[in-house]
Image (cartoon, rainbow, N blue to C red):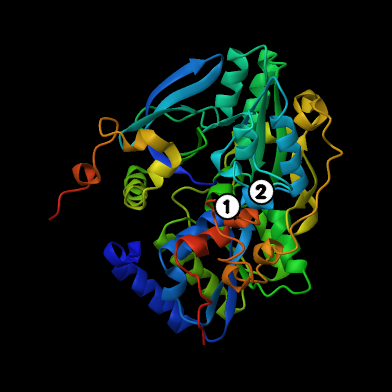
Amino acid sequence: MKYLSEFRDGAAARALAREIRETATQRWPIMEVCGGQTHSIIRNGIDQLLPDAIELIHGPGCPVCVTPLELIDRALAIAARPGVIFCSFGDMLRVPGSAKDLFRVKSEGGDVRVVYSPLDAVALARRHPDREVVFFGIGFETTAPANAMAVHLAKREGLRNFSMLVSHVLVPPAIAAIMSAPRNRVRAFLAAGHVCCVMGFWQYPPLAARHGAPIVVTGFEPLDILEGIRRAVRQLEAGQATVENAYERAVTFDGNRPAQALLEEVFETTDRAWRGIGVIPQSGWRLREAYRDFDAEVRFDVGGIAADESPLCHAGEVLQGNLKPNECPAFGNACTPRTPLGATMVSSEGACAAYHNYGRLHQLQRA
Amino acid sequence: MCLGVPGKVVEIFPESGTRMGIVDFAGIRKQVCLAYLPDIEVGDYTIVHVGFAITRIDEASAQETLRTFRELGLLEEEFGEEARTPEACPSPAAWREPAP
């Protein structure tokens, strides 16, 4: 495989990797929270460029992966109803529910549509006043402003036939949960750059201080990620635990305040179950009371649907960084992108899919 | 899913009371909600996620990132068929800087 770093930023990448190698005097496990960064790391071979002292632990920053099974089952139940137009980001369609996925519902006659933006779903609701248009509102803080705006506009325009199935999750409570877990090995975090475009990084200094872990706001390109790692290692070696911004061209300390204002108006924090991990207190957003009429779980009365995971799937261990994807017994045989057992094998941000797509079929031999 | 694509604002207009615009992503033009960047102007660069401009970015960084996206086929992943249409989007060779 030809990696990007080989044909463009090769020299700069190797220089950063060399500096990381010379700085690291002991083993440092560092978590990249965002699944987009996981894919960049595996696709570009960044983990193979790094010295053995640096172990990258892939975090739970894949919204499709952490959306609970029962919520997928609720989505499937709503999507199968006559009169419903069920809209979703494309990633979600092949995520397995208990018995089927959204593709299957579509092939069985359900009106399931992939949209690029939640505003596309609002436009569908305008065009089809006789249909119930439901948007599957998943995502981290990056996507939340888009979903908040969709609900806000629907309310403002009185679009009574629009609703949202909300499964929003938040990065800071996940970092806190990971650091507090008994088996945790993570010593530093690369914070997700686009989450921080929206939220800034004012939430992170107390986390870094409380858990003694450096947090570096990091972009998505190979050099961004290497720079994030370099700064994290430098702090770890110096015994520091502060927040640094290595994605200054896009992220400010405050973040996008107009977006945060609408998020505050539309959403409130709530306990949220993460698929494979369990409930993390105050780790999600749900619609506030004033917007509850637009909550698809209320409108379609699907709150009672519960579900059990496949016993073969270890996605939860992967999402918490306790297991590398290719260490799972089902990886590459019982579980492939064509026959996924868990969402991490489906999503374009899932760690299992990254390992499978970029040829990490065998466990890496590391010193 | 948190993929953000940089692009240049080429048009700004209100739509049902919301600040909208057209953003050019290396030749692919999409309608984008600009409500969260009330000060952004035509000619400025921004990072767009699921149809929303979420932050500003300078032109050089935007061009650099777009080049990477093109090399990795990420524009196709994000925008689908549109990114593969020759009229909508010149081939990578046409918009890469000429070799020195």
The amino acid marked with disc number 1 is Val
Q: Chain of mark 1?
A: A
The amino acid marked with disc number 2 is Pro
* Numbered circle sitting on residue A107: none
Element type at mark 2 = loop
Left or right of residue A229, residue B95 in this image: left
Residue B51 x/y as whole percent: 50, 32
Residue A115 x/y as whole percent: 54, 31
Left or right of residue A32, residue A105 in this image: right
Q: Is residue B41 above or below residue A143?
A: above
How many numbered discs?
2
Mark 1–mark 2 CB contact (< 8 Å): yes
Instruction: Write down the residue under mark 2.
Output: A96
- Furthest residue in direction front, as rendered: A108
Left or right of residue A230, residue A86 in this image: right
Q: Chain of mark 2?
A: A
Nearest the eye: B55 or A106 = A106
Residue A303 x/y as whole percent: 84, 37
Query: Residue, x 56% and y 56% (percent of image)?
Result: A35
Instruction: Write down the residue under mark 1.
Output: A346
Q: Is residue A367 above or below residue A174?
A: below
Indicate the quadrant where residue A328 lies.
bottom right
Sequence-first tag of 1 and 2: 2
Query: Residue, x 40% and y 64% (percent of image)?
Result: A44
Is residue A192 in view? no
**Mark 2 nearby-residue class (10 Å; few <14, some 14–19, many ≥20):** many
Q: Is residue A245 above or below residue A89?
A: below
Residue A287 x/y as whole percent: 76, 33
Nearest the eye: A284 or B55 = A284
Indicate the quadrant where residue A30 lies.
bottom right
